[in-house]
Image: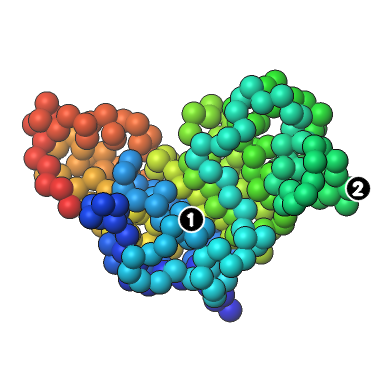
Amino acid sequence: MYEPIIEIRNLTFSYDSVPALTEVNLRIARGEFIAVIGPNGGGKTTLMRLILGLLEPQRGQVHVFGEPPGNNPARIGYVPQHSNTTQGFPASAEQVVLMGLAQGKRRGFRFTQAEREAAEHAMRRAGVLDLRHRRLNELSGGQRQRILIARALITQPELLILDEPLSNIDPYGRQCILETLTGLDSNTTVVMVSHDLGITANAVTGIIAVNQFAIATPGAKLTPAMLELMYGTHEAGCPVHALLQQLVDSSNIDSTSLESNKANPTAQECHHEPH
């Protein structure tokens, strides 16, 4: 039975009269792993903030678990694009994971046995239990990111939202993170923002392309309409057109090369018409 976790209807949001999102309609079901892709400034992070209740729609509706965003924070885990926990933070990995618990009147790092067991469970799910006593500044970028995922998992959320978790991570670390996310139980819904179009070749159940407007499709296959939304239209014979066609065919081309060609269409004698 289809159980929507996130429902968005006719959502519109602007910053100082500059549209960020326009007439967005989306539904995400329980247990799905959704990749949210699109160019810089296209509205991906804004969309996540609206789902989290950090921003309010200017028009339209957003419902999470059937209620307005922000009503069920304990049911949502969030890994932001830029964490306040930096590389040089002196705490151990386990202490960082425990920070995902509600702090209340807690002072320092005093936690109950049940809370430490919850941290152990979250770190096991994220595949980093063996790192529990290591300091954060001793870990690689991919290991630190998985620690932050464990921190988001400590409350056993039903919805996990990640904003660019693969940024600046080496290929091995990226693969470990993706294996962690695809290995979560079917009751956990994952929504992951990424610039990397190659993630669509992994075990995602659906894709949402965002560039002010949004197009959603089931499965891990990019569509021509998605690529047109994100990168505009290009005539046959243009190098960017060829790359876009390869993306449609394989959904597994490095987006870095796509961006570098897109950045200088004139030098490639490419005709580009923005969407």
State whether residue 162 is above or below residue 206: above
Q: Position of residue 17 (x, y in %)?
A: 23, 55
At x 70% / y 20%, what residue is drawn?
A: 138
Q: Earlier in the sequence, mark 1 or mark 2?
A: 1
Residue 113, disc: 2
Most foreground residue, 98 or 269: 98
State whether residue 138 is above or below residue 63: above
At x 61% / y 25%, what residue is drawn?
A: 87
Quarter placement of the N terminus: bottom right
For badge 2, the amino acid type reads Gln
- Side of 112 where 177 appears, left or right: left
* Residue 160 appearing in the image: yes
At x 29% / y 52%, what residue is drawn?
A: 15
For badge 1, the amino acid type reads Leu
- Name the mark nearer the viewer: 1 or 2: 1
Residue 22, disc: none
* Residue 117 appearing in the image: no
Q: Are marks 1 and 2 in contact (CB under 8 Å)?
A: no
Q: Position of residue 64 (x, y in %)?
A: 53, 68
Q: Residues within 10 Å of mark 2 (few under 14, many from 20)?
A: few
Give the distance between the C-alpha atoms of the residues marked 1 and 2, in whole angstroms: 32 Å
